[in-house]
Amino acid sequence: MADKKDEENQGEENTAKRDFLQAVEGEVQARWEKEKAWELDALEEWSEDDKQKCMVCFPYPYMNGRLHLGHGFTISKADFFCGYQLHKGKRALFPFAYHATGMPIKACADKLAREMEEFGTPPKFPEAPAQEEKKEKAVSADPLKFGAKKSKEEAKFGSVKYQWKIMQQLGIPDEDIPKFADAAYWLKFFPPRTQDDLRAMGCKIDHRRAFVTTDINPYYDSFVSWQFNRLKELGYCEFGPRYVIWSQSDGQACLDHERTEGENVKPQEYTVVKLEVQEPYPETFGPAVGGKKVSLVAATLRPETMYGQTNCWVLPEGEYGVYNIGNDEYGVCSARAAENMAYQGQSPEFGKVECVATVSGQDLVGLKLTPPNWVKYDTVYALPMLTVLMDKGTGVVTSVPSDSPMDWRALKDLKEKPALREKYGVKDEWVLPFDSVDIIEVPDMKTTRVAEKVCVDLKINSQNDPNLAEAKDVCYKAGFNKGKMLVGSHAGRPVAEVKAKMAEELVEQGLAFPYAEPADRVVSRSGDVCVVARAKQWYLPYGKGEWLERTSALLEKMRMYGAEAQTHQFFREALDWLGDWPFSRTYGLGTKIPWDEQYLVESLSDSTVYMSYYGIAHLLQGGVLDGNGESPVGVKAEQMTAAVWDYVLLGRDFPKDSDIPEAVLRRMRNEVEYWYPYDVRVSGKDLIKNHLTFTAYHHVALFPEKHWPAGVRTNGFLLLNGKKMSKSAGNFLTLRESTDKYSADGTRLALAEAGDSNGDSNFTHNTANAAILRLSNLLELTKDFADAKASGGLRTGEYNFADSVFAAHMDAACVATEKGYDNMDFREGLVKGPFQLKLDHDSYVNSTKVLGGPHVALEERYFHVTAVLFSPITPHVSQRMWELLGHDELVARAPWPKPVLSESEYLGYLTQDHWLQGVLTDMRKTREYDIKTQYKKDGSFKLPEDYKGLPYAVSRVIVYISEYPAWQQEVTAVLQNSYDAESNTMPDMKALSARIRAECPSAKNKKLMNNIMRLLKECQKRIQTEGAEALRVGLPFSEVDLFQKNMGFMKHTLEAPEIVVVPPGEAGPDPQGFPKRKLASPGHPLDIAFILKATMDIPSKK
């Protein structure tokens, strides 16, 4: 019982510091709210060159739940930068809004309504069958099926499949859950609570500018309508059939933010060729195909190689269907491929699959087929291959062994292994007569059978050889980039020129049809595995022409904070990847396409220029999230005509026909002109491929160049205690749970420490708890200082050397923190700034104990500097520190601390201190060595582990200082005269050697030439990184003077009553019997004599 009670008390003690911080946070946040600390309006008078403003923003989060800690990680970087810019004298604005466009909320609401209708309110769900888990495991174990990889929803909510239970996991009481069957209620419930969570985190957000999206908000609805009307007028909205990832459940395209799995997956386009089955058809095809054309349909990425088919491959264990593919034709393929084809015009009715028979792959083996574009074999056969995938392509694979390593190896195996043929019932005449057909020549490889050559070169002897992937890549690139056609109507022409044309010709001749499928598994938020449809859509033609060129130019000049080069590369890849983007939807929430109201604008497309709406949201909505309150300036949504939007956002002609007062219009215009463009947008790197690049495209299309985005900062995902966040795994934190558990500033500091890169960062329990301890201790130390200062108990007067060094450390910390925060590398700024400064302060306090303690002025500056350096990260603690230091104003408005000393001055002090600390470390080691040596000499060979237990004391220390020898001074002088500071270079070794021989008397001494040449090489190397400093003769300070300045501290740390410093050239005392030492060298006064005296009798040797 006692142990348990102690444990409970310990738990209470551990929360005391957190509770203390939370109490401080509550008081500080109340002050911010009262003073409207973060509410900023545009200045009425300003110049373009001197706005002194900074607008930061974050992609508005989707309102189907509370913010999790991953959101908080990215939001924190925006808030940190906003706070930092306030200290830099900027008027920093951080607006925030809430996204509800799209189908997820609507789908969840409708699903909840269906559950209540089917199972009652509250619902009584049937128990899951016991074999369900086993069934799932069995399916995932099938190598031909997609694995049981967790979707986003599974990771977030676990294996819960009922919406009612998901709402319970979100903390919604049962009595309130029925309200969420109305999609509009989600927009009333989650945004205000998210605002509360952000306030609890201490974010510097101007909540007056907040809003929710969709047509529930008439102002934002009008804004999006204006945006797309303008895009259409400019020719950026096109209509027509395009391949899109398609949700069969939703009956519409399923783009990135509408998926729980498969974000950024695009359609993969193929050419499906028809290998016509020669009659008579097998009975398994059924009566429906009698008299009709039936083909095995095979998807290929290489239509130019169809001349060289020797057979086709099927999976013996696979299940195939005979499907109506339209035009009185039937195709044999996998069920999954037939599903895709049904949405691409290869079925009698869009989206309807008509299967007339099912057959096994083994039943297909031996079918006589007529391949398209044959040049040698007019009849080929279906043969077995065990690596055919039923969920990729059509389940039927063409075989061109001249150009495909896998085909060459598989056909060779069947030829060479009679037992394999017998196992699958393959007759010799189906295989043995067939050989590679020469169709493409690759001159660089001196072959017309590139697959065979590459397989032989790579020693590939099996269909399971891992080198087959490399072989395939080599063959494809060689054939496409270097190959020339040997056969067909395009003989003699490069493959790269005719590949697309040959695909078109196959389609025109009725021998093939275009086909597409998702490049990887995609699951919609409605839960269905998506297909690809060729559907008529409104789309935006990204990736083309002048629009692409101008967007590329914007992204190249935009500042990429953090990992600049890597982020630029991510954007370049996104530009290469992005193509036509459908933006019309028939289901969900949002704004109707103004010229075609049967469709809604999808969620990623109405999220591209809304940052400009922040400029006037507070004037139109006044903080009423859905825009259904009274406008602070008396403007109604219907008054926001296209002409008004043009004037307010784009600076076009004044809308003379508007009934909005001119003063109001000019005020709205001024807000946009002042704040726009945004200065930095902080986002997860996963949005580069869609949202962030879309934003660039839309700004280029709509806005003048002066309002194009100025900067972006991306980050990777956030791990929690080293693992991916997942509710199902019990490893998940909402933002509010984190601030409740670790306090706001504890959470913020741990988020800052989590990482700066585009890779995964890690928020840990230990780091957050350490943050609580660090911050609470900092407040205690600040109070202790304030009390000590008030009582007059701190040292005053002139600075000593330790004071000057600590002042230099503070200057260095200010510079290092500024450098880190400037680039939004907040962990880097913390580690090299206030964290390091804390260590320097501890050393300073310790080193001045024998000097009267720390100086009051430096202590006061330390706490002031620390408060400001921490302020962007931990604003509540910094505010309380500021108040303890006697300030009434907000610390957030305090100017950024500047170095007191010049750079050369503070670096000079740091150099001296670094040198001195190194020398003192060497001295301590020498003292230990000398004591142990003396002990052995005096009689005992058995040494205790701790030398301090030995019976000796130091009575005197002699330090010998040296200087550079004459030859080194002569050579260095020549090098200094030969050095070119502008180019940071020296003459070559031959020229230097000649000059030294001519100008240095020491060079005549042959014994010294080896040393001289070593010095030359060393200096040549060092100037690459050190510049002129590499040629300095001696240290940039006097060792003797530095020792004299620190004599008191040295005596204390070395426990020596007397220290004698012997300058260069002086003999100094000659201690008798002292062990012979290596001579001192410049900068390394290691010839140090510790004169010892015995403190008790030493036992003699036995």
Image (cartoon, grey):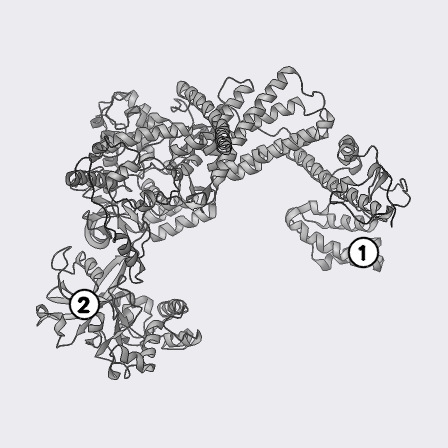
The residue positioned 19% from the left and 76% from the top of the image is 367
In the displayed structure image, the side of residue 409 where residue 1084 appears, left or right: right
In the displayed structure image, the side of residue 226 where residue 738 appears, left or right: right
Provide the residue designation for mark 2.
332
Query: What amino acid type should be assigned to the residue bearing mark 2?
Result: Val
- How far apart marks 2 and 1 lie (CA) works out to 91 Å
Rendered view: 713 above or below 614: below
Furthest toward the front, the residue is 1
Q: Earlier in the sequence, mark 2 or mark 1?
A: 2
* x and y, in percent, of residue 1008 in the image: 82, 57
Number of labelled discs?
A: 2
Q: Which of the pair 352/454 is nearer the observer? A: 352
Q: Which of the pair 826/609 is nearer the observer? A: 826
Q: Which of the pair 764/512 is nearer the observer? A: 764
Q: Quadrant of residue 930?
A: top right
* x and y, in percent, of residue 401 in the image: 32, 75
Provide the residue designation for mark 1.
998
Residue 588 seen by the camera: no
Q: Residues within 10 Å of mark 2 (few under 14, many from 20)?
A: many
Q: Quadrant of residue 934?
A: top right
Furthest toward the top, the residue is 791
Q: Quadrant of residue 1029?
A: top right
Rendered view: 373 above or below 104: below
Residue 4 seen by the camera: yes
In the displayed structure image, the side of residue 577 where residue 935 appears, left or right: right
Q: Secondary structure at mark 2?
A: strand
Query: What amino acid type should be assigned to the residue bearing mark 1?
Result: Ala
The residue positioned 61% from the left and 32% from the top of the image is 811
Q: Which of the pair 989/1026 is nearer the observer? A: 1026
Q: Secondary structure at mark 1?
A: helix
Viewer-side label of 2, 1: 2
